[in-house]
Image: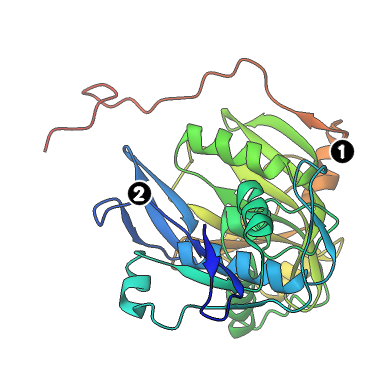
Amino acid sequence: MLTGHSPTSAENAVVVELKQWSDGTVGPSTADNCVELSIGKRFRRVLHPSVQVGGYQQWLLDNRGREAYCPDHRTGVKLPEGFAVTPLPHVDERARHRLRLPVRRIDGLGAEKALELHRYDVARTMTPEVTRVTDPIADLIGDYRAFTELQRDRLAARGIDIAPYELGHLAFRVPEWDQYVHLRTLLERHASANVEGVWNGRPMSMILLAEPLRVLDGQAIPLIELIPPVHQRVYKMGMEHFGVVVGEEVDAFSRLHREALTGQQFQNQWNEPYYILFEDFTHVKFHRRSLREVIELQGATFDGVHHVDDWVPQRLVTATGPNPLPG
């Protein structure tokens, strides 16, 4: 955060989002507004720095003239009505694209108040008293709205309209156990409950969100099914399927759309969904009951966060052991 005065003595501040990234550690991402960051031998999807700084800009604009509280709920910052926030006009857009220097100038915001904002990083950890700049779930799993729209359009091309039905859950797969634990922790911050149980030889999380995801034309997705390895066959990592709750007429639905369906899964007596497999190894599943109802019929309750205790993750072992095969 750089602060000072303009030639006309107006107080100014410049936000510079610094990243210790090199060209060898960061690359493009399939998710909107994100990059893929290499940390050791793992990849992590993070917001593009210019998007992060844009969040600061929008937060400041949204909160002009009112008291905004930092995350510890103790420090209040009064944002003046008259300040302006604009991108610096002389920034090289090519440099911005290369993640070199995403910046914003904050005109008319005193240095002391600007530093308070920077110190508490309120744009990324906002409290309920202020309007959210970003969607925290989309920040974690990607653009779920675009994913559901893509699958809906694929279904429509096959003659299936899902508008009349509720959506039960969104499934998200991760390739590594450590990623599962990390993402589980982050998602639980935005959840009212998590029922984790063992399925196909490993725990899976059924995360009931505090606020349902809003997708398509106002439809709600209340639950995220978070799935770690070992995966039973080839699936796309990330957002992999969502469940459509057809209800008691699901068998008639399957007969009507027999040519479009790929098959049926027989998971247990309460859950035998039909499904369509697409060319990118994503699915849409069609259920008699929502996944939450299925979990509750098995005796579980969504009454807080519950994990499988003392779980030792599985490891894939080949003829040469757990190490990669020689080239």
Q: Which residue extends farthest left?
A: 327
Q: Which residue is at the front of the view, 265 or 301?
A: 301
Q: Please, which residue is most extreme toward the top here?
A: 310
Q: Which residue is mark 2?
A: 20
Q: Is residue 278 visible?
A: no
- Residue 297: numbered disc: 1
Gap in angstroms between the C-alphas marked 2 and 1: 50 Å
Quadrant the C terminus occupies: top left
**SS for tag 2?**
loop
Q: Quadrant of residue 126?
A: bottom right
Q: Is residue 7 above or below residue 262?
A: below
Q: Who is closer to the viewer here, 36 or 72? A: 72
Mark 2 nearby-residue class (10 Å; few <14, some 14–19, many ≥20)? few
Provide the secondary structure element on which disc 1 rests. helix
Front residue of 170 and 23:
23
- The x, y position of residue 211, in whole percent, is 82, 56
Residue name at image x 53 percent, y 65 percent:
4
Q: Amino acid at mark 2?
A: Gln
Q: Position of residue 316 (x, y in %)?
A: 37, 28
Disc 2 vs disc 1: which is toward the camera?
Answer: 2
Residue at image position (85%, 46%) is 293
**Residue at image x 45%, y 42%?**
175
Q: Is residue 4 visible?
A: yes
Whichever of callouts 2 and 1 sits on the residue coming sooner in the sequence is 2
